[in-house]
Amino acid sequence: MGFFRLMFQEHRKTKIMLFVLLFFMSLTGFYRLNQSRLTELEDLLENVIQSFIVSTADGISVGYFQWDDMYDSIIETDDSFLDHYKHDLLSTFSIVEEIDLIEMPFDGSDLYTVYAENQELHLYFGIFDSNVEQFIDDKMVRMKFNHETILDQAHISGEVNFDIIIKDGDSIDSVHITSKDNILGFYHFLSALMIGLLGIFFLYTFNKYSISSHYEIEGLANIVMLLSKKDAYTAEHSADVAKYAKAIATSFGMTRKQQKTLEKAGFLHDIGKIGISETILNKTGKLEKEEFEEVKKHSIIGYEIVSQFPNLNEVAIIVKHHHELMNGSGYPDGLKGDEIPFSSQVLAVADVYSAMTTDRPYRKGYSGKAAFEIMENMSLNQELVALLKENVIH
Ligand SMILES: [Fe+2]
């Protein structure tokens, strides 16, 4: 519950509005989806059931009431003949519930007539001779169809339950199908609830992320600015390294996210120099052994600074290893070949190239071509050196 409270803590009104909106939108969506699906099913089932009733009635008419023997027995008022076949009909057609011989209720000479009243479905059968040339004009056989057993008889079963509704009328269109099930189940409410909560969760995460990355970028920009006051070369050089690292990453086919991470690592790779004495950093002559040991600390210090920012953990690792060399002679951990994070290998190539081609107070920068000649004999990932060369030498 603590988490939910946290989620609603800021921008409470916006979040509640978003929740209500998402909840009702998804509920309406479920409703419309179900409704159109059910309407289709109802129409389909209605056709099946109506055809089933009509074909049953056709069968009964042909089998029993277009028949000389039945015609003659009714003319001769021989009840025993019809009684015998009543049993036959009731046992053969379980949807037939009652059978009566009645006085002609309406004029006409149809084989049968559908008649629905008070939610009961009746079929009136005319009695014909075998050639359907003569019919009895004062008597008919009335059958009551039990519509509740029709669904079972027609072998309709499925995930949704249906009802047959009989509306008054004198055609098969009186038979209607409607769904018994509630169109929105508990499951739909639960899903809509989850969608609403998910919306708030995304908004919460988005806010959290954008706020923290805002502080991060601002914080890092301040550090880089401080560094540039102390060591102008490093600040400029970092922008170049970021550019070269991104170019290599793009040529190599690294993902956009990896490219972005590398670009950030490029800007920040020497940030640890903030912890190194200005005298050593700006020294123009050759560094003493102890001085060089001091400078080497910048990759660890950089790692410690950058890893303070939770979203920059990957960047911190790349920064830590940007001075490792493929043969294991680099620092801080002396990693070899594949042990060195791939992005650090990219950064190393970009770093060396930028350093060699930049003018320093104590030497002029190498040309691109000369720089690559030297780099091709250095313990760098040569595949990446070749990629950078393709990018910068035309
Ligand atoms: Fe460095």
Image (cartoon, helix red, strand yellow):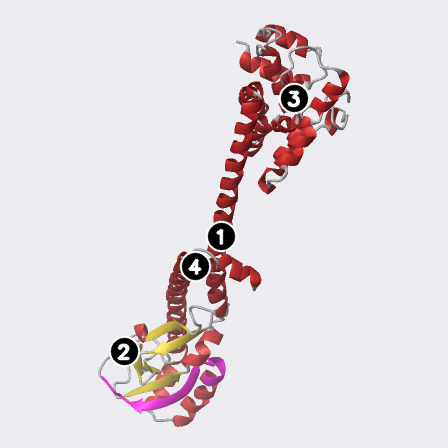
Which disc is residue 204 wearing? 1
In-front residue for pair 234/242 = 234
Which disc is residue 348 wearing? 3
Which disc is residue 116 wearing? none
**Residue 321 visible in the shown view:** no
The residue sitting at the front extreme is 279
Picture quadrant of residue 184: bottom left
Between tags 1 and 2, which lies in front? 1
Q: Position of residue 40 (x, y in %)?
A: 38, 62
| Image position of 108 with respect to 156: above or below | below
Among the two numbered marks 1 and 4 on one chain, the one whose residue lies closer to the N terminus: 4
Q: Are marks 1 and 2 in contact (CB under 8 Å)?
A: no
| Image position of 376 with respect to 236: above or below | above
What range of the chain is rendered magenta?
A: 90-106
Between tags 1 and 4, which lies in front? 4
Residue type at mark 3 is Ala
Residue type at mark 4 is Arg
Q: Residues within 10 Å of mark 1 (few under 14, many from 20)?
A: some
Q: Dot 2 corresponds to which residue?
A: 170
Q: How many marks?
A: 4
Among the two numbered marks 2 and 3 on one chain, the one whose residue lies closer to the N terminus: 2
Mark 4 and mark 3: Cα distance apart in space = 47 Å
Mark 3 and mark 1: Cα distance apart in space = 38 Å
In-front residue for pair 206/233 = 233
Q: Secondary structure at mark 4?
A: helix
Among the two numbered marks 3 and 1 on one chain, the one whose residue lies closer to the N terminus: 1
Q: Are marks 4 and 3 in contact (CB under 8 Å)?
A: no
Tell me if 4 is positioned left or right of 341 in this view: left
Q: Are marks 2 and 3 in contact (CB under 8 Å)?
A: no
Q: Dot 4 corresponds to which residue?
A: 12
Mark 1 and mark 4: Cα distance apart in space = 10 Å
**Residue 360 visible in the shown view:** yes
